[in-house]
Image (cartoon, rainbow, N blue to C red):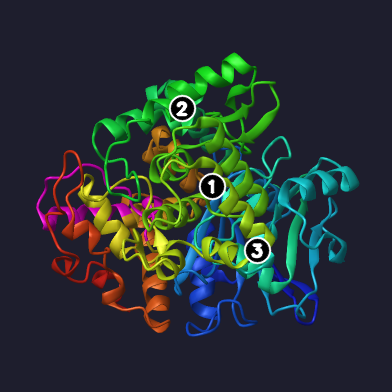
Amino acid sequence: MLFLRINMTTRHIHTEDVPADFIGLGGRGLTSKIINLEVPACCDPLGPDNRLIFAPGFLTGTPLVNTGRLSIGSKSPLTGGIKESNVGGTMSTALARQGLKAIIIEGKADDGTLFFLKINADSSVELVDAANYKGMRNYALAETLLAEYGDKFSISSIGPAGELKLASASIQTTDTNGKPSRSAGRGGLGAVMGAKGLKALIVSKEGKYKKVIADRTSFKEVSKQFASSIKTNGWSGKVLPELGTAGIVSGVNASGALPSFNARKGCFAGAEHISGETMAKTINQRGGKTTHKGCSQCIISCSNIYVDEAGKPITSALEYETLWAMGAMIGNSNLDAVARLDFLCDDIGLDTMNTGTAIAVAMDAGYKSFGDAAAAIEMVEEVAKGTELGSIIGNGPDAAGKHFNNPRVPAVKRQSIAGYDPRAMQGMGVTYATSPMGADHTAGFVGGGGSSTAELISASQSAQIHMAAFDSMGLCFFAQSGGLNNVFKAISAITGKPFGNREWEDLGINCLKAETRFNSGAGLTQEDDRLPSMFHDENLLPYHKYLPYKSEDLGDVMAPFKQS
């Protein structure tokens, strides 16, 4: 496999052999190592010295199911530190079939110029002038490009938010239907893509490269076991296909862990109206689609196509985090409005979580009333217009807090929390506070509470190590039901070398070491590993009290990863 390097300043395109030290890496492990080695930690995230890296996982491109996740890495304009944003869709598999271990975008095009990076079926690469597409939203862009080039291409693109270089800007990737509904939303990497002058990455899905597998017989056998375990598991084999990730709305709400009204409450009275059960019933009644395959290699089909009363599609992949951020967090129980907000964010190119939380902060300050869905839609539309209000909302909750003079900003390193309140799920608070990625549930999910601080720290550390390794594989988070031992066997069958728990842990630890080293060089300190005071000073109504620990009580959770 190869590295493909694109210098946007000189427009020079070249490939290079992958250095030996990178051979066993993929996904997040690869992006974080490259960034740590090549990007000056103190550089301007929107300047020419930053890199934007697209990297399939180590297992992507093999017959193993649910290995279609893509890691996009860079220095984040939102957090100021290192960032890996993970996305499904079809791009990761398309890149792997081109024999590309990573695409590394460096330099910066002249201000105001835009390009497409196009990789054809024969693996030829070209930069195409995209001036005529300036300001175009993602759905119209994908439709136009697929009509021009054919439906055998995958697209990763930015909308107006990315072109405006806003800190909540996403990179949208097309699903199996060619819709740009999959979002690499966290960290504002769409702004980096816009700063580079890259409007879209367009890659043929007809590449001929086949990953070398040392023991194909063993790989075939473990692939069957892995797929069977996923399909027979109650969560990944039944609940997710029927309800998607929205299936957890009711449970999280019942436990008092659903941040609502800018995290003033942990329960939302309107939760039943935005639950997975209600969503599935609505979709089926209107002729939409549940059990939809959105990503390459997927056998879970947790996606959906949500339609209006006339049966016209509104959005795809209406998931838990968006139902929370555009629902409970802003006090909105109108499911159609949540779907509309999801579509607008995908179309304009925004992280629904950061944007929903920014709207919640504004509503909490009295700018608009909680539950005013029409106002929320107007605020998101302002982003695309490039207005002052649009810039505030598009730059996330921290920017909204400063503008509206509201100190209640549920974010760490300027990135919003996810849909799990740390006062109810106390281990999540440790991960939110200490992850190199900023507040990010996928960086180390820890459920429950009531344990000692030391036990919560240990659980978060273990979860962060595990997820750093997991994100390096290109595996879907929900494919963990396939069994970690089967993942180990698959890796061993590819490399022809033993692989087990020790190698897995080493992979995760080395990834976190690269990330913490970069963040330290970027000026982030232990003081940045802090939850906002609201979680320490306010009870979580109606069930939970303050966090049982202060952020400073955690000590330096990431200390083990800061050693050379």
Residue 97: % across, % down: 71, 49
Q: Amino acid at mark 1?
A: Ala
Q: Which residue is mark 1?
A: 375
Residue 440 is one of the magenta-drawn residues: yes
What is the quadrant of residue 66 in the picture?
top right
Residue 53 versus residue 65 in the image, above or below: below
Q: Amino acid at mark 2?
A: Leu
Within 10 Å of disc 1 (Cα), the crowding (few <14, some 14-19, many 20+) is: some
Spatial CA span between label 3 and label 2: 31 Å
Residue 375 visible in the picture = yes
Q: Which residue is mark 3?
A: 162
Within 10 Å of disc 3 (Cα), the crowding (few <14, some 14-19, many 20+) is: many
Residue 510: % across, % down: 38, 67
Report the span colored magenta.
439-463
Q: Nearer the viewer, mark 3 or mark 1?
A: 1
Of residues 445 and 364, which is closer to you in this image?
364
Residue at x-position 26% and y-position 30% = 254
Residue at x-position 58% and y-position 29% = 304
Q: Which residue is mark 2?
A: 240
Residue at x-position 25% and y-position 55% = 429
Mark 3 or mark 2: name the one nearer the start of the chain.
Answer: 3
Q: Nearer the viewer, mark 2 or mark 1?
A: 1
- Quadrant of image for the C terminus: bottom left
Helix, strand or loop for disc 2: helix
Q: Are marks 2 and 1 in contact (CB under 8 Å)?
A: no
- Quadrant of image for the N terminus: bottom right
Residue 390: % across, % down: 59, 62
What is the quadrant of residue 81 in the picture?
bottom left
